[in-house]
Amino acid sequence: MTTALAIDSTKKNENIAIGEPVDYTITATDYVAGDQVSLQLRKVSDNSAVITKTVTLSGASTSGNLSGTWILKTSQTVGNYYLYCELSTDSTINTGSACITTCVLLTPWMLTNVYMAGIPFEDFQHNTLSDAVAETCVETAIGQLEEDTKIFWYIKTVIADPEPGDTYDYEIDKLTYVKRDMRGLGIITFPHFMVQSVTELKGYLASVEAIDIPVSWLEINKKRGTVHIIPSTATSATITGTIGTSLLIGNVVENLIPAFWKPKYTAGWDESAQNFEKGHLQALGIRATLNATPILSDAIKPGVSSTSLSMDGLSESEGTTASAIYALLSAREKTYKDQYNAWLRKFIRRYRGPAFSVG
């Protein structure tokens, strides 16, 4: 008889955070005790193995299961993978499992087991709160982190003052024209960091288009979210009259012209390039924990210190004491707020502008 293998995981078809345990179960039939199985995590795109470990089948020459867990290493890239195993002595005996997707998003497991370690994720009846509660805390934290850092977690299309029919993910107001920034080679500062591309840049005086800058003239500083205008003879800008030329070279009376520039651009972390700022994921975990602590404070019932019952049995009163879990929550909350604010100040300093704090 020929040995047969099957592999499964409770994590299949799920998003798995970097560093999160992934369980596996190998089912083998008609094997010889001592046979070794090569267990691999393979890329869906090209079937290449990125993590490999060897496990040994033991017991009688019959059927059996071999279960275990491994941790996805932090060096692992984000993408789609699947679990695969093959008999070391005969690679033709093999099988694969359903897809597993590694992601940089914080999963409920990472939130409750890493960032909230030691804090029961429970209601006052000691029932574990659902993953949906943790997911809400994470999703809220993503929006808060995007607002605090001015970097989108995923790449988004941004447009100023959109018109009917425009496609975009995020809307901003038109940007102010700054005269001193247009002297020499003009520079425009966008409201977001990590600008990936600019597909349109026009200038308006009220509703009249004054300048249409060719995309080929734009030199982007992705990290700082600034764009230099470097004229090229290969293409021409569309300019309305002499005022357009004067605006382009900063030869105007006004130092500031509100609501002038109308850009369309993409910005955000380029997930495929794995260029997340060091500590950004940790900041997300801290922010999500800060969102969870008020929920736990409301859910946890204070400890009962005394109970009194009236003679007629119709009324009852309780004296309560603050549970120790409140002290734990308060201490974690204070520590995380201090860590988050310190990280945010350093983060913004490396880019530009003032930092804001969590109150």
Image: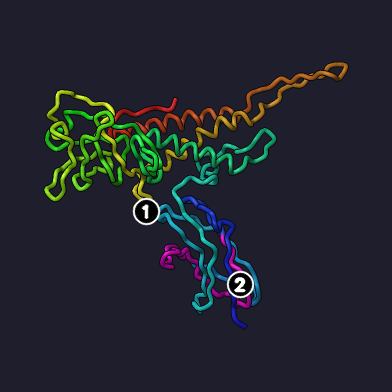
- Quadrant location of residue 203? top left
Nearest the viewer among 301 and 58 is 301
Q: Does residue 260 appear to the left or right of 317 in the view shown?
A: left
Picture coordinates of residue 141, whole percent (x, y): 47, 37
Amino acid, disc 2: Ala
Q: Is mark 1 on a helix, strand or loop?
A: helix
Give me the residue at 37% from left, 31% from top: 342
Which amino acid, mark 1?
A: Ser
- Classify mark 2: helix, strand or loop: strand
Task: From the viewer's side, name the closer residue of 193 and 188.
Answer: 188
User: Which quadrant of the figure contains the C terminus?
Assistant: top left
Rendering coords of residue 167 (x, y %): 39, 44
Judged from this view, the residue extending furthest toward the bottom is 1
Which residue in the protein does label 1 denote? 272
Tag 1 and tag 2, C-beta contact below 8 Å: no
**Neighbour class for label 2 at 10 Å: few (<14), some, many (≥20)?**
many
Judge depth for marks 1 and 2 and give the one in front.
Answer: 1
**Residue bearing mark 2:** 28
